[in-house]
């Protein structure tokens, strides 16, 4: 809150800041770090580790600069594919881990309000409604909604050239006309087709590139109306929901950009979700693909004190593979800082 977040984050069970307010919050947090003696470096990519005798001695930055350090907290996020490869080259132990893939689904927000609030929909004190749904298929797969953004926007979240990745966000007021949510199916290392620790990344990349091609290039995302997805047709026009994804979309067959067991589980889940949020299966709801960065497909091994197989290296946050989302990543960072303080305290 001291950094500019609304007071309600202290008591709401689903605290919300909003992308518009978050921009100032992040700047304020950075100022706080600097005022406490920290340094923030832009355009400084960690490209290697300096190691000696199985211990970390520092990091290499932008290929040539060395920063000496006995302790390195590595918090590079779940999309730092180059960093995972670099760690492997240095012999840091990594493993595959499960994550989830799927699509974003958009409905009119008014429609979700009516389904959830009934006759009270539109009451100014209620705010835009949300939902959270899960379906466990008899075959063992599970589908669920994730990162539901009331009054939000589907956004482009690729981190590599030639791939399309979706995500979602809302402004503080959540006053957009559409509600969106990730609609995901869990996948496991058995799906990746290789024992290589980074096979999950290659697998992830494959669907992102197929989505790029299906979108016709230019980072347009493939879209399909839910009714057409369920009956296996490429859509020809939008209905009640216009896509919020930028820079643009193209009608495509989403079965061509996702594994068949993922699209099959989504199809199975839709009627189940429809029974819980009445009308969830409305044919004009819009699916945008592909959502592949739900969490990391890689886990960096850590011992009970959160140290990697290289002493002095503390992989933390979502990229370490033990956290998902802002809160658990932040708490993971605090736990690692505590471990560092215990081990390296000067007395
Ligand atoms: C659009 C969007 C919306 C989201 N909304 C929510 C939400 O509402 N609630 C929620 O809980 N979570 C949300 N998430 C997920 C959330 O952002 C992550 O879980 C969280 O940011 C993970 O924190 P982290 O510090 O581990 O990694 P990150 O926040 O990903 O930070 C990693 C940082 O490391 C930097 N980096 C990577 N490699 C290197 C390198 N080699 N050298 C130097 N720096 C490097 C990156 O540039 C980045 O700044 C959202 C994610 C996205 C993309």
Image: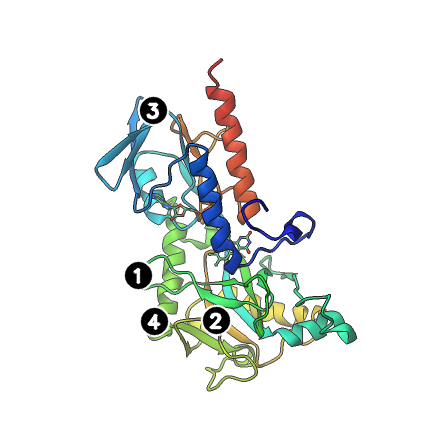
Q: Secondary structure at mark 2?
A: strand
Quarter of image, res 216: bottom left
For discs 3 and 1, the disc positioned in front in the rendered view: 1
Q: Which mark is residue 288?
A: 2
Q: Which residue is mark 1?
A: 161
For marks 4 and 3, the one nearer the N-term is 3
**x and y, in percent, of residue 98 in the image:** 50, 49
Q: Establish whether ligand 1 lies closer than 8 Å to the Cβ of label 1.
A: no
Q: Does the residue tagged 4 have its C-beta within 8 Å of any atom of ligand 1?
A: no
Which of the two marks, 4 or 1, is nearer to us in this view?
1
* Residue at 31 percent of width and 64 percent of height: 162
Q: Is residue 187 visible?
A: no
Task: Tell me the residue at 46%/16% (across/down).
Answer: 346
Q: Secondary structure at mark 4?
A: helix
Q: Could you give the CA–CA distance between mark 4 and mark 3, rounded to whole angstroms?
A: 44 Å
Residue corresponding to mark 4: 213
Q: Earlier in the sequence, mark 3 or mark 2?
A: 3
Do residues under tags 4 and 1 come within 8 Å of each other at their CB atoms?
A: no
Graded by Cα atoms within 10 Å as few (under 14), some (14 to 19) or many (20 or more), the crowding at tag 2 reads: many
Tell me, yes or no, whether the two marked residues, 4 and 3, touch with CB atoms within 8 Å: no
Q: Is residue 325 above or below residue 344?
A: below
Secondary structure beneath disc 1? Answer: loop
Q: In the visual, does 278 lie left or right of 321?
A: right
Residue 30 in which image quadrant:
top left
């Amino acid at each position: 809150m001291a950094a500019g977040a609304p007071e309600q984050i202290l008591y709401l069970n689903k605290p919300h800041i909003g992308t518009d307010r978050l921009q100032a919050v992040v700047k304020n947090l950075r100022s706080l770090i600097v005022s406490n003696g920290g340094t923030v470096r832009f355009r400084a990519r960690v490209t290697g580790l300096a190691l000696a005798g199985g211990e970390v001695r520092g990091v290499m930055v932008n290929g040539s600069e060395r920063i000496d350090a006995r302790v390195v907290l590595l918090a590079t996020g779940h999309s730092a594919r180059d960093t995972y490869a670099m760690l492997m080259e240095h012999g840091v132990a990594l493993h595959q881990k499960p994550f989830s893939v799927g699509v974003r689904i958009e409905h009119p927000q008014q429609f979700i309000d009516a389904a959830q609030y009934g006759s009270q929909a539109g009451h100014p004190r209620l705010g835009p409604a949300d939902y959270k749904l899960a379906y466990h298929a008899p075959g063992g797969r599970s589908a669920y909604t994730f990162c539901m953004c009331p009054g939000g926007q589907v956004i482009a979240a690729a981190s590599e050239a030639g791939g399309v990745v979706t995500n979602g966000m809302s402004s503080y007021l959540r006053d957009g006309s559409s509600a969106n949510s990730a609609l995901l199916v869990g996948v496991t290392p058995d799906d990746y087709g290789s024992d290589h620790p980074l096979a999950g990344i290659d697998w992830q990349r494959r669907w992102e590139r197929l989505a790029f091609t299906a979108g016709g290039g230019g980072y347009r995302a493939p879209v399909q109306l839910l009714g057409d997805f369920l009956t296996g047709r490429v859509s020809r026009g939008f209905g009640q929901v216009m896509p919020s994804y930028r820079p643009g979309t193209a009608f495509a067959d989403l079965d061509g950009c996702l594994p068949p067991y993922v699209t099959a589980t989504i199809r199975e889940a839709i009627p189940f979700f429809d029974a819980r949020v009445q009308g969830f299966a409305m044919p004009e709801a819009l699916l945008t693909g592909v959502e592949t960065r739900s969490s990391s497909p890689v886990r960096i091994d850590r011992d009970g004190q959160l140290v990697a197989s290289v002493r002095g290296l503390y992989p933390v946050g979502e990229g370490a593979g033990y956290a998902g989302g802002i809160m658990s990543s932040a708490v993971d960072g605090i736990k690692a800082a505590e471990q560092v303080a215990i081990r390296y305290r000067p007395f």
